[in-house]
Image (cartoon, helix red, strand yellow):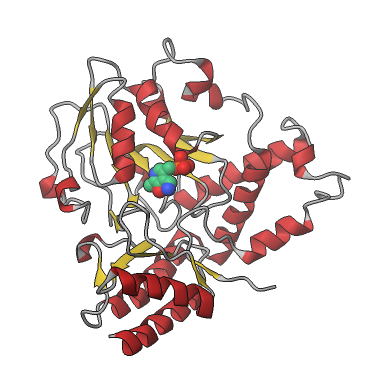
């Protein structure tokens, strides 16, 4: 087996232990004579997986009894529509903090349902930072405040939740979900596509505070798009294999030591990388230091030609894969989610030092 150092922004690297366990159970799940993909989503086996995954999420995030958890389809992109469809009416305003490509897509959808106010935007400076609390200029009575906790393309991240004075947060946590502890009491909705930190693409995890959910519109929203539809029982066929994989990743997160473990682990990896970036002027961080993401580190080299050379050598000579920045911004992006081993970052950092000494 030759597993490369995989810095993909998503679908991203998964823990080898999880892949091996899935491989082991692929053709026959727990002596049942068939795989989990070949069983009814109403089977006792699948219902146990669904239940266990929800219990694990509750335990890891400290959700208590206050939240509903659902495994939906359509990606985080569907949540851009589903959240305002359920919670925002024509005469209401929601505040959307604009910190990048994904925030923008969320704003575009929300405008179909109600008014959108931007309390902050870093668009003019190329989304190079997230706001401080002082910079947030909220509307008078927002229904909720939406933010993208980690900006996968730019490589910025909120280090803590924006302060909204009690207005519920609706968070696109796609690219830092379960990478560190969060203060769940501040959230109305947390949603995340699984394909970065928690599993394969195809399932979206949505966590909603019960008292916020009680305010959802149940009259004008199609059944499948109402959050309530998905709370009592499994409504329609879920992506069973994906939820099974998520459950294995959650087990792995628990076994490693939970979210505090990953916070430290991820911060250490990011520090290794950013220290190398900051050593001199050869590499240049793409965003402001205070806003740097511990998940997606973005940086530039002196010229685009050198960037091409860097990416080519990284992959061909060192098995360092998928380091190319997002097509909209260029440069280099190293995505270092929970399952990215420290050894991969060390290999990258050694290559960076070597590349600088030869090309600097
Ligand atoms: N939000 C963020 C922060 C993302 O990084 C992505 C995917 N890269 C999305 C939303 C879109 O997710 P999906 O493809 O699951 O719809």
Residue depicted at 40% across the width and 55% down the height: 181
Quadrant where the N terminus sits is bottom right
Query: In what quadrant does ligand 1 lie?
Result: top left
Q: Quadrant of residue 83?
A: top left
Q: Position of residue 36 (x, y in %)?
A: 76, 43
Residue 173 seen: no
Residue depicted at 53% across the width and 64% down the height: 339
Left or right, residue 51 beside residue 218: right
Residue depicted at 66% across the width and 29% down the height: 237
Residue 333 seen: yes
Above or below, 180 relative to 118:
below
Quadrant where the C terminus sits is bottom left
Q: Quadrant of residue 325?
A: bottom left
Residue nearest the observer in this picture, 143 or 204: 204
Q: How many marks?
A: 0
Residue nearest the observer in this picture, 310 or 195: 310
Residue depicted at 71% across the width and 62% down the height: 20
Q: Quadrant of residue 78?
A: top left
Q: Position of residue 3 (x, y in %)?
A: 62, 70
Above or below, 359 relative to 47:
below
Q: Position of residue 188 (x, y in %)?
A: 36, 34
Left or right, residue 2 beside residue 307: right
Above or below, 261 relative to 185:
below
């Amino acid at each position: 087996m030759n597993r490369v150092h995989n810095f993909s922004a998503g679908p991203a690297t998964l823990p080898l232990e999880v892949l091996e366990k899935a491989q082991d159970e692929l053709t026959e799940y727990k002596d049942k004579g068939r795989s989990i993909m070949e069983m009814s989503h109403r089977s006792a086996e699948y219902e146990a997986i669904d239940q266990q995954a929800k219990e694990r999420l509750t335990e890891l995030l400290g959700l208590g009894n206050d939240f509903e958890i659902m495994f939906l389809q359509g990606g985080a992109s569907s949540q851009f529509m589903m959240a305002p469809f359920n919670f925002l009416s024509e005469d209401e305003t929601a505040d959307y903090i604009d910190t990048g490509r994904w925030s923008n897509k969320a704003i575009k959808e929300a405008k179909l349902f109600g008014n959108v106010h931007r309390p902050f935007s870093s668009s003019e400076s190329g989304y190079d930072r997230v706001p401080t609390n002082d910079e947030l200029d909220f509307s008078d009575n927002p229904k909720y405040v939406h933010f993208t906790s980690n900006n996968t393309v730019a490589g910025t991240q909120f280090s803590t939740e924006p302060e909204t004075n009690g207005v519920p947060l609706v968070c696109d946590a796609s690219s830092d979900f379960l990478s560190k502890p969060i203060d769940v009491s501040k959230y109305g909705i947390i949603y995340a596509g699984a394909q970065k930190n928690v599993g394969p693409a195809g399932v979206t995890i949505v966590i909603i505070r019960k008292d916020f959910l009680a305010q959802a519109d149940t009259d004008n929203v199609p059944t499948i798009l109402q959050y309530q539809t998905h709370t009592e029982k499994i409504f329609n066929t879920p992506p069973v294999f994906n939820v099974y994989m998520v459950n294995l990743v959650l087990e792995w997160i628990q076994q490693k030591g939970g979210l505090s473990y990953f916070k430290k682990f991820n911060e250490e990896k990011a520090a290794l990388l950013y220290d190398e970036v900051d050593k001199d002027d050869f590499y240049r961080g793409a965003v402001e230091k205070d806003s740097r993401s511990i998940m997606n580190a973005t940086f530039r080299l002196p010229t685009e030609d050198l960037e091409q050379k860097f990416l080519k050598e990284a992959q061909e000579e060192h098995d360092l894969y998928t380091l190319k920045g997002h097509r909209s911004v260029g440069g280099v992006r190293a995505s270092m989610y929970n399952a990215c081993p420290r050894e991969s970052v060390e290999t990258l950092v050694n290559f960076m030092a070597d590349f600088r000494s030869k090309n600097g």
